[in-house]
Amino acid sequence: MIRPPSGAFAEEVGSTVRRLTGVVGVTVGLALLLSSCGDGKSSDSGSGSGDKSEVIAIAADPLDYINPLNENGSPGIQVAMAVFAPLVTTDPNTGKLQNVMADSVTPDKTSQTWTIKLHPGNTFQNGQPLTAKDYVDSWNMTAQGSNAWKNNGFFSKVDGYDALNPPTPDGATPKPTAVKTLSGLKQVDDLTFTVKLKVPFSQFGLTLQYLGLAPLPEEVRKNPDAYKRKPIGNGPFKLAADWNPGDDIKLAKWDGYKGPNPPEAQSITYRFIPNADTAYNEFLAGNVDFVDVPPTKVKTFKTDAPDGWVTAVSSGANYLVIPAWDARYKNPKLRHAFSMAIDRKAFADLVGLSDPAKGLIAPDIDGYRDNACKYCDYDPAKAKQLLQEAGGFSDPVMISYNTTSATGQIFAEAIGNMLRQNLGLTVKYAGKSGSEITTLADTRKLDGLRFGGWGHDYPSIEDYLTPMFKSNGDANFAGYANPALDTVLAKGDAEPDQEKAIKLYQQAEDIALEDMPLIPLYTKSNAYLHSAKIEPRVSKYVGVSALYATFK
Amino acid sequence: MIRFVLRRILAAIPIGLIVTLGVFALVFAMPGDPLRELAGDKPIPAAVMAAKRAQFHLDDPFIVQYLLSMKDLFTGHFGTTFAGADIGDQLRLRIPVTLKLATMSLVFQWIAGLLFGLYAGFRRNGIVDRMLLLATLVVLAVPGLVLYFTGQYLFGVELKWLPVSGTRDGWPMAYLLPAICIAIAGFAGMARLTRTTIVDTSNADFVKTARAKGLGEQRILWRHVLPNALLPVVTLMGIDFAGIFAGAVLAESIFNLPGLGQFLFQSIRFKEGGVVVLLSTLAFVMFIAINLVVDIVYGFIDPRVRNV
């Protein structure tokens, strides 16, 4: 459940569903100067031996533990996806929800209480049967604020969360609360439990595919620190060898996994190579079977590996963020003028592997409309007129960009030049670290525009609108608030019929586009290279997966 | 000699204090919230944030944070990084990597520097001398980043002579390419210095005197020129050795060697003041120790400095 820093650009936005932090941007930034021009014949073998084994490069710092409940970064979730299994998942072929560990997930009439029945016969890799108690206890542990586990926030929708997360005065150490369990979480029998939410939420079933909700077995729950480097999962792979600091993570297929569509690979090695360009070179040298194409190679990867690349639309969208806390930018006409002064086609070409955005949500999401935005066409004349109607803008427009991104300044100047040339504005730039931009924005001290990117945690149009546009949304980059939009969102949340719910969410998107706190810019594809012996799974719903690759 | 050593060690204590305090202050002053940098844009629930801040003492005043990390340093209870890695484990893993890389690259660098420098010094304006001048200019002009990636691409990807990155091939194979790259980037300074001092010394009066009284060229070289010419070279070697840590930051990142340089790079990125101070202290102690060794060696080469 990690999102790119709001100052980040799309190239920092990670793979299909999960996000990378600015971390990758730093290493990427180092390598800006370099461009590769190799013949890049896709190599036919990784260093793994035997049949159906693959080496997957992850361009990130090595993991220090595997615990899905305390993990929200792309690298950690990627590994956890092999070792653990979620309750439900998105069927890569149909885009529909599919049960994995669950037998059924059923809402009550109001979508406030959800009953989850587990499929019988599943076990953990230590042989213990997987029960409802494992879920209830694991989730309670995560919801306990003093444990400081990263997926704690997921449970804020569940009844009783506040009792486990009392407000802590600044500087004080949170104490474990007397209450240890979420009042909204109830075990019914060995295989059934119920989740009562604070308010109705029609999309809750979709959120359960998040891997960060995977259960831990009892022995791990008793002493999680002892199992940091020897996870006991319930997924298709288990650790094949001791995993010490600095080692690759070596996984072997676990026969006890009974979920649908198990991966074909017999063994998988995850190799962490923090520098993305080095990881790319490792692929070109034939030492790994799968690698993400870093932003510095977007223009060259097709010639580097002519027979070994795949792309897929990244589930996410990228925006220009207009601060709602700055009265000078308040007039929607001014925002529309900015939007129509941007040549999205040219900008998407500059970014590479990208398409102009036509709305606020990603194109692979149910409920996406390619004509949602009325103010996203490039029309300098209309833009100028709108600017005049809005009373003009005499101050310089400040654009902040992330200096840890290889392309931050280039993109900022591209947008700045369009505003300058098409609207006659004065533009200034400020380069800062991603976390500094975020901190300034959080405290309402950031001056002017910045870039923002978002990728969903679960494939629902709602996961774009609530976080970014609801007045208390947890990724409300612009600090935007409109009670009308909040009301429509609440109606959507309470609507059990998915079709009708989507219609309501689309109304919310329309309101957000009229107010335009975020100017849609582009949606991006991710590219990956793979060796000749594997064919990664490519799905228009869940992107590219090396874990589910088929072998030749 | 013992008094000299003791005096140097005592003098190092206040310097160490200033250096660690300064480094800690710099990391502290970096903009942005360190825990935020870890989390991306996903909001961290207040309780989780508070627990993490308390764990890493982030809410304490600057000086308290500094003293706490100094305490950790002296008691050897290093704790974990923000991301959850055990710092003691990391040091055990990383120190040998950096030492292997450092020694290998220095050996290459010194051999190349001395050989080219000596030869160019004695054969002034010869072909080697001119080539050396050109080569050093080129090497000095090319950023390390470009050199490292070019080396990696050429020898790792294209020719496949050496591993692209990582330590899987063990010592020495895994370290050869980064060590050669560091040596290429660094030998120029040594070569230029050696050449210059050789030239200077060869023209010195005492060399002319030696020649005038009929000493053989070999004897002049070994007894008169070299010992005097090599004094500044020894100093540079010391600085090189102490500074290898800094050079390792880039090389270890690009060649994916899990050494101290890579660790330092990560820690600065995440604003982990405690780890940065720990690593800086390590570098500092090494710097002081090496300088001490250089001073002692100096004493053997040059009797004049013994009584300073």
Image (cartoon, grey):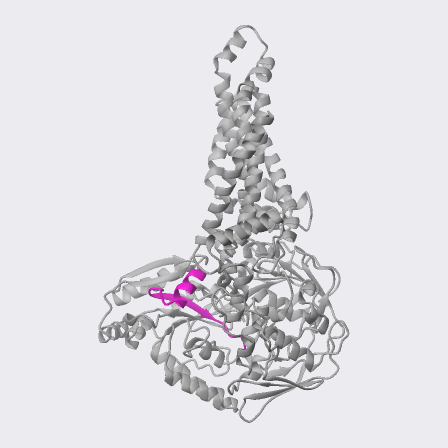
**Residue A278 sits in quarter:** bottom right
The magenta stretch is A434-459
In the rendered structure, the answer to whether residue A419 lies left or right of residue B193 reads left
Residue A65 is a magenta residue: no
Residue A456 is a magenta residue: yes
Q: Residue furthest top?
A: B213
Q: Residue furthest bottom?
A: A109
Q: Residue furthest front?
A: A178
Task: From the top left corner, tell me how far across and down residue A329 is, in percent.
Answer: 30, 71
**Residue A414 sits in quarter:** bottom left
Task: From the top left corner, tell me how far across and down residue B35 is, in percent.
Answer: 51, 62
Q: Quadrant of the C terminus of chain A?
A: bottom right
Task: From the top left corner, tell me how far across and down residue A153 is, in percent.
Answer: 54, 74
Is residue B156 visible in this depiction of the protein? Answer: yes
Relative to residue A364, is residue A529 depicted above or below? Answer: above
The residue closer to the viewer here, B217 or A517, is A517
The residue closer to the viewer here, B237 or B58, is B58
Relative to residue A469, is residue A108 depicted above or below? Answer: below
Task: From the top left corner, tell me how far across and down residue A81 is, in percent.
Answer: 64, 71
Residue sitting at x 55%, y 70%: A18
Residue sitting at x 77%, y 74%: A127
Relative to residue A466, is residue B122 depicted above or below? Answer: above
In the rendered structure, the answer to whether residue B89 lies left or right of residue B118 reads right
Q: Quadrant of the N terminus of chain A?
A: bottom right
Numbered label tally: 0
Is residue B265 visible in this depiction of the protein? Answer: no
In the rendered structure, the answer to whether residue A131 lies left or right of residue B5 reads right
